[in-house]
Structure formats: C-alpha cells, structure tokens
Image (cartoon, rainbow, N blue to C red):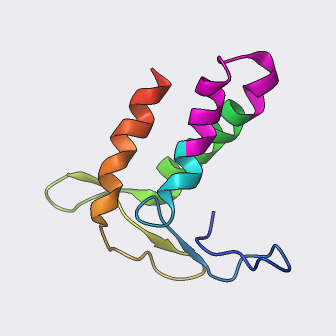
Amino acid sequence: MPLYLNPKSGRFTTTRVSLGALGDSYYEYLLKMWVMRGRSQEAEMYRVMWEKAMDEMIEKLVFTSNPEGLTYIAEFERYAVRFLAICCMLCTIDEILLLWQ
C-alpha cells in the first residue's frame, strides 16, 4: 500500500511503498484488530487482509544481497527500480510477525 492518501478523493498520492516509518502502522493495526477482537470470526477479515499484505511484502520488499546472500526488507517505488533505503523503523516488522504466533 502506498504511503499517502488524498483525504478528499481517497486516492493514493504517491507510489512509494514501505514497511518503515509512515507505512508500518497500517500492517500493524490489521493484525492488532484481529487479536484485540479475540481472533473471532467477525474479525477474520483483518487477519486475511494482513496475510495478503505479508505475502505481498515478501514478494515485493524482501531481497537478498549479492554476493553475501543476506536477506533484507527494502522500500519500493512503484513503476521504478526498487528503492534500496533500509529504514530504522523496519525493526518493528519482527514485532508484527510475532503477534501472528
């Protein structure tokens, strides 16, 4: 999901995607809503949305360095070459993934 929305139109105003600063809250609260609602059937849509988002994160934001073979999460600029900034806020992704357990 791109980082910015126009509040009047509801359309995205940027093509930058990140799990770092500005982007992590959306993913975090999808999972938290499911957990806070007791992992109930009524809250199942939040879990499904979160799982889809995590699948897309793995597909588009997880890379392997060459030649070291280290795995990292980067930011992404749609319609362009990947944006290799590694944000300090990406450290929260492990907490988000731990909530899933």
- In screen coordinates, is 82 left or right of 12? left
Q: Quadrant of residue 20?
A: bottom left
Q: Position of residue 45 (x, y in %)?
A: 77, 33
Does 3 appear above or below 94?
Answer: below
Q: Quadrant of residue 62?
A: bottom left
- In screen coordinates, is 27 left or right of 75? right
Residue situated furthest left in the rendering = 68
Say whether residue 4 is magenta.
no
Q: Position of residue 11 (x, y in %)?
A: 79, 76
Image quarter hosting the C terminus: top left
Q: Position of residue 88 (x, y in %)?
A: 27, 62
Task: Identify the magenta region.
Answer: 29-45
Does 81 appear above or below 69?
Answer: below
Residue nearest the viewer, comparing 16 with 82: 16
Q: Position of residue 32 (x, y in %)?
A: 57, 34
Residue displayed at 68% across by 23% down: 37
Residue displayed at 49% across by 26% down: 100
Residue displayed at 20% across by 52% down: 70
Residue displayed at 42% across by 68% down: 75
State whether the magenta stretch is mostly helix, strand or loop.
Answer: helix
Does 37 appear above or below 17?
Answer: above
Residue situated furthest front in the rendering = 36
